[in-house]
Image (cartoon, rainbow, N blue to C red):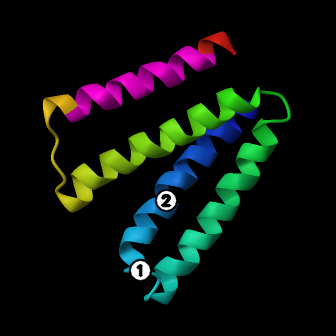
Amino acid sequence: MAWTFVLLAGLMETTWVTALRYSQGFTRLVPSVVVVAAMTGSLLLAGQAMRTIPMGTVYAAWTGIGATGAVTIGIYLFNEPATAQRLACIGLIVAGIAGLRITA
């Protein structure tokens, strides 16, 4: 169950960073509320995961999932570049998360 919390926390990281883009510097109410709610949920879920998974493992996986999700959303929604180098770097992050999961 703890790894489910990590995954959900990472997805909430992706949610809040995407909402942050839509909030236009916290000048739009609904995206700004989503940012705060998703940040709070992400922190709570990561905290729950740390009850059984080591802190460093949770933090690295949580932020890695969030970073991977943010780059993916950026490519699909905001036309950010999808160069081979960027995709390779995302692959390295995913490999690191998988390695942490296997060794935890």
User: From what the image shows, is residue 1 above or below residue 21?
Assistant: above
Q: Give yes or no for residue 100 being in the magenta stretch.
A: yes
Q: Quadrant of residue 12?
A: bottom right
Residue 49 within the magenta-colored segment of the rendering: no
Residue position marked by numbered label 2 in the rendering: 15
Q: Magenta part mainly helix, strand or loop?
A: helix
In the image, 59 versus 1, the foreground residue is 59
Alpha-carbon span between mark 2 and mark 1: 16 Å
Residue beneath the point at 54% across and 53% down: 13
Residue under the point 41% across and 45% down = 69
Residue carrying label 1:
25
Q: Considering only order in the chain, which callout, 1 or 2, is on the residue closer to the N terminus?
A: 2
Q: Looking at the image, which residue is at 41% across and 63% down? A: 18
Q: Quadrant of the C terminus?
A: top right
Which residue range is magenta in the image? 86-101
Residue 86 in picture, x, y percent from top left: 23, 35
Label 1 crowding class (10 Å Cα cut-off): few <14, some 14-19, many 20+?
few
Q: Position of residue 79 (x, y in %)?
A: 16, 57
Q: Amino acid at mark 2?
A: Thr
The reply to whether the C-beta atoms of the residues labelled 2 and 1 are less than 8 Å apart is no
Image-based side of 99 in relation to 6, left or right: left
Residue 40 percent across, percent down from the top left: 69, 63
